[in-house]
Amino acid sequence: TARRLDGVGSTIFAEMSALAVRTGSVNLGQGFPDVSGPAAAVEVAYDAMRAGRNQYPPGHGSPDLVAAVVRHQRRHYGIELTPEEVVVTTGATEAVAAAVLGLVDPGDEVVVLEPYYDSYRAMVQFAGGVRRPVTLRAPDYRLDAAELEAAVTPRTKLVLLNTPHNPTGHVLSRAELEAVADVARRHDLLVVTDEVYEHLVFDDHRHVPIATLPGMAERTVSISSSGKTFSFTGWKIGWATGPAALVAAVEGAKNWLSYSSGAPFQPAVAHALDHEEDFHRALRDDLATKRDHLCAGLADLGLEVHVPQGTYFTTTDVSALGWEDGEAFCLALPERAGVVAIPSQAFYEAGSAEGRHLVRWAFCKERDVIDQGLRRLRAGR
Ligand code: PMP
Ligand code: GLN
C-alpha cells in the first residue's frame, strides 16, 4: 500500500458495524437511522428511474437539485447563491474530500476541531497537508479562541470546521463562530465547514452557518448532506456551496473522484428539500426525546453522560465504570452485553489522553432498539 494510507486504518464505523452483525449485537455505533426518509421522495426516485434518469447526471449536479439547494440556503439562512456556487457530491464525505484535495497543497496546515470526524484525517493526509488540532474538552466542549489562535501559523491554509459537531454533539455558538471568523479574516484563511447535522439541533440551541458572518461568505465552503437531514444515508447525495472560485476548486477535484453519481436520487432529494421541512422538524423532535431516553438510561448504569446540543450522538465517560480505555470497553461490549458503541478515541490524534475513556452512542434508532440496548447493558453490567 502507498504511504498515504499509513495510519489511517479503516473507518471505525464500518469495523464496529461488522462487529455488530457478527455478534448479533444491538448497533448503537454507526450513525444511520433505522427508519427511511420521506416516502414521497422515495416515490420521486422510483419515478425518475422509470422515466430513464439512469445515466450520468451532470458532474456539477442535476439542475433541479442545484436549484433546490439554492432555495434551501435562501429560505433557512438568507444566503443568496447562483447555480455556479453549488456543487452536488457523493455524500458529504466526497464534498469534504474534494474540498481538501481541491484547496490544500502539500505542506499546508489545516486546523481541525479535535475530536474530529475520521475522514478528515485521511483527507488531509491524502492532500499532503498537516493537521493542527484544536481540542474541544468535556464537559462543555467549548472552542477556546486563544487555542485556536495558537494553532495558526504562516502555513495555515484553512480551518476545517464541523458544527453541529460529531462526536461531541456540541453546537458552536455565535460567539465561538465569531472567534473563528475573526481568526480567519485576520490570517486570510479559508474555512470548510461540515454542517451535515444543520437541522438536528435541540432545545434552545441554534445552528449558525459561519458563511453568514461578516466577511465569511467569500472564504467559506459549506457542506451538507441528505443523509442526515432526510435519513437517506445510503443515497449518498451531498453538496458544497460557496463562492464560485472555491466551488470550482471542489468540483475540480470531484470531477476526478466520482465525477457524478446518484442520478435518480438527485430529483428525489430536490423534492425533499422543497417539500419535506416537516420531516426534519419531526425527526429533530423525535431525536430530542430519544436523546433524553438514552442519556437517562446510560446515566442509570452509572456512566457519566454528556447530553448533546445537536447531532444524534451522546458521549459517555466509561471510567466511572472502572474502564480507562474506551476502545477496550467497546471491544468487550458485544461479548459482555450484545451492544456495539464507538470508542471516541477514533476521533482524536493517536495517543491522545483526552478521548481515551470516552465512548459514543447513537440514538437515531427506534425506541425499542434503544430499549433493547439498555436492557442488555443492564443485564451485562
Ligand atoms: N461529516 C460528518 C460530521 C458526519 O457525521 C458524516 C456521517 N454522516 C459525514 C460527514 C458523511 O456524510 P455522508 O454520509 O453524506 O457522506
Ligand atoms: N457519520 C456516521 C457516524 O459518525 C457514519 C458514516 C460512515 O460510516 N462513514 O457514525
Image (cartoon, helix red, strand yellow):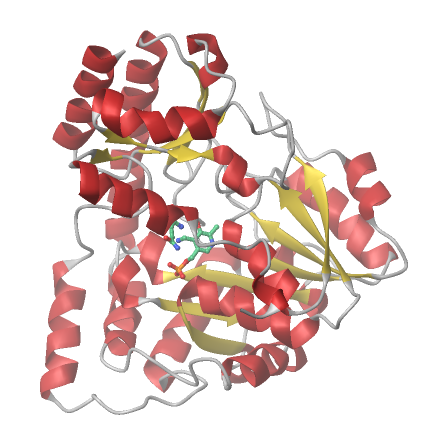
Give percent across and percent down for residue 17: 28, 45
Q: Can residue 102 be seen in this view?
A: yes
Camera-nearest residue between 354 and 265:
354
For residue 279, side relative to residue 209 (left or right): left
Residue at 50 percent across and 54 percent down: it is 9
Give percent across and percent down for residue 271: 25, 70
User: Dividing the image into four equal quarters, which quarter contains ligand 1?
Assistant: bottom left
Q: Taking 320 as reference, is 366 above or below it?
A: below
For residue 261, side relative to residue 130 (left or right): left
For residue 79, side relative to residue 43 (left or right): right
Residue at 59 percent across and 24 percent down: it is 140
Camera-nearest residue between 327 and 376:
327
Q: Taking 209 as reference, is 88 above or below it?
A: below
Q: Taking 334 as reference, is 263 above or below it?
A: below
Q: In which quarter of the image is the C terminus?
A: top left
Residue 80 lies in quadrant: bottom right
- Give the number of marks: 0
Q: Taking 143 as reference, is 1 above or below it?
A: below
For residue 189, side relative to residue 332 (left or right): right
